[in-house]
Amino acid sequence: MPTDRSSDQLSFGAYLGNILLRYGIPLFIVLLCIYFTFSAPKFLTVDNLLNVLRQISINTIVALGMTFVIITAGIDLSVGSIVALSAVISTGVLKNGITLFGHTLQASYPWNVPFGIIVGLLLGIFLGLFNGFFITRFNMPPFVVTLAMMTIARGLAFIYTGGFPISELPQSFIIIGTGYLGPFPLPVIIMLICALLMHYILTRTTFGRYVFAIGGNEEAARLSGIDVNRVKLIVYTLSGFLAALAGIILAARLGSGDPKTGNMYELNAIAAVVLGGTSLSGGKGNIGGTFLGALLIGIIDNGLVLMRVSTFYQYVVKGAIILAAVLLDKIKEMRKL
Amino acid sequence: MAYLVMRGITKQFPGVLALDNVNFEVERGEIHALVGENGAGKSTLLKILAGALPMDKGEIILDGKPVVFHSPLDAMRHGIAVIYQEFNLVPYLSAGENIFLGREPRKFNGFVDFKKLHAEAQAILNRIGANFSSRDIVARLSVAQQQMTEIAKALSQNAKIIAMDEPTSALTEKEVEHLFEIMRGLKEEGVAIIFVSHRLEEIFQIAERITVLRDGKYVGTKRVEETNRDEVITMMVGREIKEKIPKRPAKIGDEILRVEGLTRKGVFSDITFSLRKGEILGLAGLVGSGRTEIARAIFGADPIDSGKIYLEGKEVKIRSPQDAIRLGIGLLTEDRKRYGLILPMTVRENTTLANLMEVAMRGFINFSRERAVAKRFVDELAIKTPSVEQLARNLSGGTQQKLVLAKWLFTKSKVLIFDEPTRGIDVGAKVEIYELMNQLAERGVGIIMISSELPEVLGMSDRILVIHEGKIAGELMREEATQEKIMQLATGGSIADR
Ligand SMILES: Nc1ncnc2c1ncn2[C@@H]1O[C@H](COP(=O)(O)OP(=O)(O)OP(=O)(O)O)[C@@H](O)[C@H]1O
Ligand SMILES: [Mg+2]
């Protein structure tokens, strides 16, 4: 009984299925867009599409760092809390300066805004380093270390603010989140610059190559002379830095540094990364995919709001769509073998 | 008709026709060897038989009935078991639990009946003469014992055909003997055995028939008594090749590496030796004598408790592989899948991994240079791959070993440590690797070669250190070394006439 699996025997349904598999997430996005266009008339307008891009900019920036972390077969659960902490610290510092041991360090106008931003970014770098240090130096699982950091950073954000948002921010700060360059919102521009940069680092540099090597086989990477700990340290630092950047943009857009923001951002970022085809077991992934993943999530969120689906249902629908999209990718992978 | 008939089997991978209309037959109670060069398609054929890979074309007829296997479980139900080189065992379960994994005998209340499980597992283990208990944890068993566990697992499922992919390559001589006894016993019971090996002497010792594949094509099947080594080799490579070990004496220069009193507690102690430029130093000894561990310590992969290392006369501190590579020391590990390659990376990326700076400028990789480097090595080492963009995962076992070699050649090391360099490598490629070692020696590279194949140690080394239980048991110059002397030292004896 000879078995022949040539393609000319495929039914039309299987043919459609194959197309869906071949183009995976991008096709999924297009189909979803078509659907939303018909069910929510406002969806396909330039304003709304730019709006989607602005909405995804924060998640994308966080997810960029997460992509690096996940490619090394790690995870960073602290990013959501770092977003919040950086939001409150940068806004707090730009308003009130830093008070340590009774001395206050404050930059005067107009330098208070860059000062606050820089302190926020440095904080993200520091917390990322802290994550990386415990993960590499004591060989602790990233899940545990960053889970601890998640609650520590969240706690610090509450302590710093006493639980109240920091508002009445200067216009020169708010513009980062609300301004435009030509037709493009500033957060979108920042996101695109970051994504391009990260793409180049990941694909063109020796560092990026090492990131993949570590995720693919950490021991073989070490035996090939790669300084595994240093690479991992940088990766977690990068993730902390990008989360802090996202926190600053978020505070600027909301016009306040709120210790309660950034909730569940780590999960949204992980979802974007996984939707983008990066494997949670490491060694595989790309920035373009992460961007598309974040875009898919953004479109779902936006479309469901425009369709006036109630928030409670949104959660369920969004989860189901993410599951379907990843399932699609898995089937595609299995077919290839 | 034969018990198992595979006919017209064809399998296409992207860019590689791995099997092209291959025929293969096995009788009941027969030991049938499957041979061919690296990448000839042996493992692929076994995977198809096991139901682990779908075939594009062809048919499998078992006991006169056509069958189609959709999964390994499917094949298993038809009495076919394939034992791969990387075992499919759960490391932290006992041997018995592994043997009955997913088919545990139950008590009436639904709980696993461990008493019965271990009694039955032990009976099977005894049947094949295993020297360990069904209750032993798999992770603590030796390679040979794990293999026996796999065989017992196959038997527990009433396998009528057991296929083994290079089962002897990681075994000691004694263990190979034992495996052969097991195989002969199974044969008496009517089990058919398919046996893949690159060692022709083994094949002529154990097999009744030999089937040869070349480049995915079926070349022919011979009874052992009707053929000989040379004919089989010619069938394999399509031309005549000399099997001789082509040692060329190189000019031996100044000392390049010296190790003094190297000790790692409980593993090896007081290792002192030196290596000179252009010299090939063989490290002989039994599997588990500590040779690999000594190599890893010199390379900085494991810490040492005491001892000094000198490179070109200067003391050096090697705390990590990174240090070693910077100083010009390379280590080709024995287990290529686990330690040698990044399997989800391409041939190109693996080639340059240990010396990426060489093809980069200020941290940016120069892709055209990298590709050129990879292409050069693919040509030089005859690495069988459709392109340098092929994933290492998709290469055949022996081809992967060549890729590891390419990686270390590209580091331009002054000292290279080869740990079992020809394991899983076909006859022709073996000679190529020896030639390569000759060339390296001529260029003044100092080579340490760990090998369990005595003819190879004797043939290629200028000098031989024999390791026994973590200590140097003796040193033999090329001229005085014999298999007997090495074995005597390796097993703890001393040489009377020295
Ligand atoms: N999953 C895969 N994808 C692409 N090519 C593959 C895959 N598996 C095997 N190949 C290719 O198919 C050919 C046959 O490989 P196979 O592993 O069967 O060789 P082999 O005879 O077992 O060789 P060796 O003696 O080196 O183990 C090789 O060229 C190999 O690169
Ligand atoms: Mg093979």
Image (cartoon, helix red, strand yellow):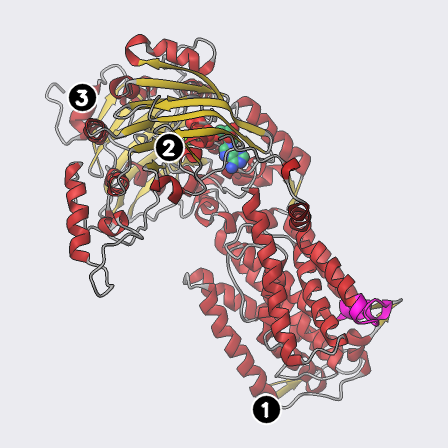
Residue A319, located in which quarter of the rendered image?
A: bottom right
Q: CA distance from mark 3 to mark 2?
A: 26 Å
Relative image position of residue B334 (x, y in whole percent): 37, 35
Q: Quadrant of the C terminus of chain B?
A: top left
Residue B257: assigned label: 2
Label 3 element class: helix
Q: Which residue is mark 3?
A: B485
Inspect the image, locate mark 1, and give the three-letter code of the amino acid beneath it. Answer: Gly
Q: Earlier in the sequence, mark 3 or mark 2?
A: 2
Relative to A245, does residue B497 appear above or below in the rendering?
A: above
Q: Main secondary structure of the magenta part?
A: helix
Instruction: Using residue A304 as the reference point, say whether residue B199 is left or right of it.
Output: left
Q: Nearer the viewer, residue B137 or A206?
A: B137
Label 1 element class: loop
Q: Nearer the viewer, mark 3 or mark 2?
A: 3
Q: Residue at x 73, y 67 (%)?
A: A299
- Magenta stretch? A37-54
Inspect the image, locate mark 2, and give the three-letter code of the amino acid beneath it. Answer: Leu
Q: Which residue is mark 1?
A: A162
